[in-house]
Image (cartoon, rainbow, N blue to C red):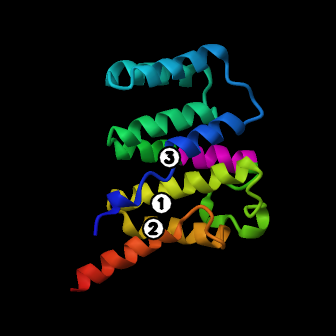
């Protein structure tokens, strides 16, 4: 069973929506220009990455920059680096939602995770899903399972789609038993 088919948990459309709507803080124009250049020059890895790091220097911790970095690393197959950015996204989203940094200690009652009109909980959930997915892709199945299970706890109606990750893990285990 291949996890690659489960898709990018923070897709281009989700990331764009979240980055566009998410934060109260404005993205400096120069940082926005660097993000735009990174997108235009995506095919030139070193140049695109340099623009992303310039944007990060100008707007450290800004969700739009983090999402840009995450997507760059993810789509370039640099999954360990994407995982590090996913961790930063979880931390940023936890802070923005008034939650503790450790996702293991967050309970469904602490935030209105079922209120999807509010973009902040969505950013948290999508970031945690990215973390779970990347852990699984990198072979850290127990950590991926724990994060996906936490997602199901936080999002019992599964609007974020965490159950698919748990289903993939279950199929992987069944394949191993055969």
Is 82 situated above or below 178?
A: above
Residue 42 location (% of width, % of height): 38, 25
Q: On the rendered image, what quadrant is the N terminus found in?
A: bottom left
**Closer to viewer: mark 1 or mark 3:** 3
Q: Circles 1 and 2: CB distance less than 8 Å?
A: yes
Q: Which mark is residue 94?
A: none
Magenta-drawn segment: 87-96
Would residue 96 be found to the left or right of residue 101 on screen? right
Q: Residue 25, located in which quarter of the rendered image?
A: top right
Q: Position of residue 173 (x, y in %)?
A: 32, 79
Quadrant of the image for the C terminus? bottom left
Q: Secondary structure at mark 3?
A: loop
Residue hosting label 3: 11
Which numbered dot is residue 132?
1
Within-10-Å neighbours for mark 1: few <14, some 14–19, many 20+: many
| Residue 101 can be seen in this image | no
Give me the residue at 66% from left, 73% from top.
Answer: 156
Question: Is residue 142 rendered to the left or right of residue 159?
Answer: left
């Amino acid at each position: 069973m291949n996890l690659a088919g489960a898709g990018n948990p923070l897709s281009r459309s989700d990331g764009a929506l979240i980055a566009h709507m998410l934060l109260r803080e404005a993205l400096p124009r120069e940082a926005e220009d660097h993000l735009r250049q990174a997108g235009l020059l995506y095919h030139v890895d070193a140049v695109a990455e340099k623009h992303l790091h310039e944007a990060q220097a100008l707007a450290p911790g800004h969700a739009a920059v983090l999402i840009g970095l995450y997507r760059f690393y993810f789509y370039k197959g640099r999954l360990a680096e994407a995982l590090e950015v996913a961790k930063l996204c979880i931390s940023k989203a936890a802070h923005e939602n008034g939650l503790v940094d450790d996702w293991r200690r967050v309970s469904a009652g602490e935030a209105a995770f079922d209120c999807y009109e509010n973009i902040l909980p969505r950013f948290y959930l999508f970031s945690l899903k990215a973390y779970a997915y990347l852990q699984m892709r990198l072979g850290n199945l127990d950590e991926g399972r724990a994060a996906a299970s936490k997602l199901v706890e936080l999002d019992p109606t599964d609007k974020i789609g965490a159950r698919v990750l748990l289903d993939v893990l279950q199929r992987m285990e069944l394949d191993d038993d055969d």
